[in-house]
Amino acid sequence: MTEKSNMVLFKVDINQNYKDILLQHLAQLGLVHIKTQPEFSELFEKDDIILEKINDLSQSLEYLFKNLDITESDLQKLNIEPDQRKKFEVKDISNLISQLTNEINYYSNRVDELKKYRTSIEIELEKINTIHASYLFLEKYKLTRDKLNEFHHLEFKAFTTFSKNLENIENIFEFSHFPNFLHYDYLTNDRLAFFIIYPKEQEEEFRDRIRIIHAEEMPILKKYLLSTGINFPRIAKEIKFIITSYNKNQKELERLRDDNLLLFAAAYEIVQNLEEYNWVSHQFEVLPFNRSSLSFYLPSEKKEEIQQGLLGKFEDKITIESIDIKKHKFVTLKEDIDHVHSGKLKDKKDDSDSKEESTEHEEKKKDLRDSAPTIMRNNFLVRPFETITKMYGVPTYSEIDPTPIIAITFPILFGIMFGDMGHGLVLIISGLVGWLVFRNKKGKDFLNFCWIILYCGIGAVIFGFLYGEFFGMHEIKLLNTVFMHLEPVTIPIINITLNNPLGNIMTIFKFAVLIGVFHLNLGWFVQFLNYWNQSRKFLGFTDSLVKIILLTGGTILIFTYGFDIYTWLEPPYPILLPLVPGILLIVLKPFGKIFHLSYLKEETVGGLIGEGTMEAFETLLSIMSNAASYIRLLALALAHISLMIAIIAMGDLVQGEGIVNDIVSIFGSIFGNMLVILLEGLLVFINAMRLHFYEFFFKFYQGSGVNYIPFYSEDNYSVIIFEVTSIKDVISEEIEREIESKETHDDIIKAEKLISKKYF
């Protein structure tokens, strides 16, 4: 069976000024599981200003990363020594968030300025490039400053627009409607430039026409015109200047990114930790005298180490209580006779306080095993099956983890339904290849499923050998070469042969039922062990073992005497095999009440008899339905073999000789086998899970436990140093208030005298 660590419940009492330091210490340990305080969690979810600030900070950081093209992979490439980490000296979490927010906002604003400036540069660059292209167009017509000055009664203007507007340009500036001289040329495939010469007195009509095509006017600037032609060197110089400014802007962004990457990594790391950290801070219970308490679980083997570490760090500023939670013993919260709330305040409590005290008393009655987290520690060989166990639920603290059991039974049930040596080898190779390829890329559950597929492949190979099946054939044959004939193999103890299931259906049927009976009995046996470990041995004998005897007796009765009721009632009266345990299931539990067993003291004898009767009836019905469920083993096994026979038969339909026929036959066989492996393999896998979840687990497994989740925070790039505010007693605070009041009073008198002298 799996080994689950014993847990210890710690309750620490500390001054609120040291709360953040305590959480930081616990997070660095990475071992403690924080106990949830439900009432504080509800308040935390409804109204939490800190959480809003964390979300705002996260969004600001995401915005900054987007603008600077920073990804998680960039942060992971940072390789720094521990002493190079970014340090933050703060008073508390709120101060840390404010400090980070200011830092991120500063760089975000700086980035916005650079981005805004770069946008203006890009606009200028686009303009100058358009001017350059347009002047290249005008150069063809020998435009100079002197020629431009010769236009007295005419207007010369140049424009750029989209090429699709060409037809509209020619229509609206048709000479008969509007006297002008128009010429155009393409700058790019979708953009053209044109100039137009028209009478100045028709300026108003020209503007009305040019608005129709939304053309962009290209200014004819004299600085770009010389008496000899167009000043292209000046345009080139301006383009170079703008490109230089753009490059400087880009380099400044890159410098801002590279020089502060460690700060951004530290901020990202802290933000990732803050939400969890903030949640944990709400699990403190507020106590009088500026103190708080926090409860958490940790593995028992770490008890002394953690306790000494806390005492060494906080010395007399912390008090620690611990409770060892035994798996096999009812454990409750201990009464704290040295607590501040004892004796002195008891008589002064009002009605609401009495209710709170009653609630606290009820809380102390609860079994701590119900809320203690579970650490699943399995051997590496069976650990992959933890994924299937957790799909049903995490084991409760005091119950047996079924993972090692299903690591054996799951491949067996899968193999019974999918028995084929060839297909099993394919699954083994697939699982191994999947693990090798994705071991550094995929999550833990995906890799666990790769191993589960490998184990299922082993089960398929074993039962394929017993069935005498290799890719649907009764011999190991590859490339027309027979390596081995699969002869019938007799299974020891039960002395049966499973070879050729289609011709041996009744034997396979009996084998499937026997497997179901064994599987169900195994579930009740684990239930017996759970009762034993929980010190409920009487229930283990009167419930679990009696049900095992009932199912076993019924199986012997049916398999030996069939369904001949008259034979059941004749000597040696085989009907007694299931009848006696059925009667015992009804009458034994009331004896527990008579013997004053603690876990039956609240029950009545009549109630126990009625409960036992109903349970006996339900057990009988469930046995029949459960056993019927295991007939699926036979059905799917026969379906698997039948499909392979059909595929082989379809392959034999390909007639003729030659390489083409061989290729068609090979590809058809591969496709058919892959179809069976994928589709039926999935169906068989789902049925194996169903048999475990609904037939096996239902007998003994609750799966309602709490998964052990250590509280920890990453500190690869950041170090947080909390400054402890000086702790003052009540008398000191009162004295300071009096001194402050006296100083304020004296200041007011001085101000009155000064005003009186000046204005009165």
Image: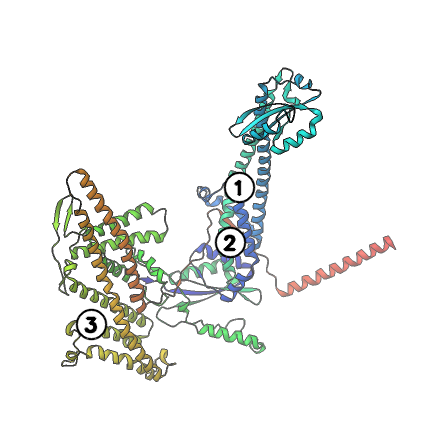
Residue 490 visible in the displayed image? yes
Provide the secondary structure element on which disc 2 rests: helix
Question: Which amino acid type corresponds to the residue marked 2 in the rendered image?
Answer: Leu
Q: Residues within 10 Å of mark 1 (few under 14, many from 20)?
A: some
Residue 380, percent across and down?
30, 55
Q: Which residue, given by chain and number where applicable, does mark 3 sit on?
A: 555
Residue farthest to the right, as pictured = 760
Provide the secondary structure element on which disc 3 rests: helix
756 relative to 488 in the view: left or right: right
Per the model, the C-alpha gap separating discs 2 and 3 is 60 Å
Residue 241 visible in the displayed image? no
Dot 2 or dot 3, earlier in sequence: 2
Q: Which residue, given by chain and number where applicable, does mark 1 sit on?
A: 67
Q: Which residue, given by chain and number where applicable, does mark 2 sit on?
A: 274
Residue 231, percent across and down?
61, 19
Colour basis: rainbow
Image quadrant occupied by the N terminus: bottom left
Kindly indicate the quadrant of the structure image that contains residue 640. bottom left
